[in-house]
């Protein structure tokens, strides 16, 4: 039984929540990169010049790159949700096309799948 989507009750509030998350994420990314020379560059420079504790510096550098990948993915999720909203497809599961419950969208405004499809997706595509 496929239940087709209707837009969430208050898409304006959800759009505002997504835009606020996007702004906060971009500000955090800019802060973490610290102007002209961000943390990754500082870590790289320290790594090249320091002879002691290279393992710690390598770990910090790897952490910075992982954070950057996570932030980039999070930004892409927000942008995709906003794009779906603009197209009028927001709130519809991309797998089974049922309406994603509003409570799920409020909790996770970037959700692309209903809980059942998200669980199935995660079991077939485990996070590394």
Image (cartoon, rainbow, N blue to C red):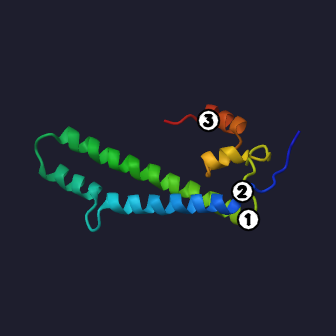
Q: Residue at x 46, y 59 (%)?
A: 24
**Label annotation for residue 87:** 1
Secondary element at image label 1: helix
The residue sitting at 76% across, 62% down in the picture is 88
Residue mark closest to the camera, 3 vs 2:
2
Instruction: Give whichever of 93, 10 is nearer the camera.
Output: 10
Secondary structure category for the residue under label 2: loop
Please tell me whether residue 62 is drawn above or below residue 37 in the rendered image.
Answer: above
Q: Which residue is mark 3?
A: 122
x%, y% of residue 63?
33, 44
Q: Nearer the viewer, residue 76 or 5?
A: 5
First along the sequence among labels 3 and 1: 1
- In this picture, is 67 found above or below 35? above
Q: CA distance from mark 3 to mark 2?
A: 21 Å
Q: Residues within 10 Å of mark 1 (few under 14, many from 20)?
A: few
Q: Which residue is mark 2?
A: 90
Image quarter where the N terminus lies is top right
Q: Badge 2: how crowded within 10 Å, few (<14), some, or many (20+)? A: many
Q: CA distance from mark 3 to mark 1?
A: 26 Å
Q: Position of residue 94 (x, y in %)?
A: 73, 49
Q: Are marks 1 and 2 in contact (CB under 8 Å)?
A: yes
Residue in view at x 66 percent, y 34 percent: 119
């Amino acid at each position: 039984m496929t239940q087709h989507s209707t837009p969430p009750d208050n898409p304006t509030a959800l759009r505002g929540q997504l835009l606020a998350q996007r702004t906060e994420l971009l500000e955090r990314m800019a802060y973490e990169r610290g102007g002209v020379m961000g943390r990754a560059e500082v870590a790289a420079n320290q790594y090249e010049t320091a002879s002691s504790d290279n393992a710690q510096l390598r770990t910090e550098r790897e952490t910075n790159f992982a954070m950057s990948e996570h932030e980039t993915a999070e930004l892409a999720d927000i942008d995709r949700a906003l794009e779906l909203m603009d197209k009028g497809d927001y709130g519809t599961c991309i797998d089974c096309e049922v309406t994603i419950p509003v409570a799920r969208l409020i909790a996770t405004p970037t959700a692309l799948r209903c809980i059942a499809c998200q669980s199935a997706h995660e079991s077939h595509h485990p996070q590394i």
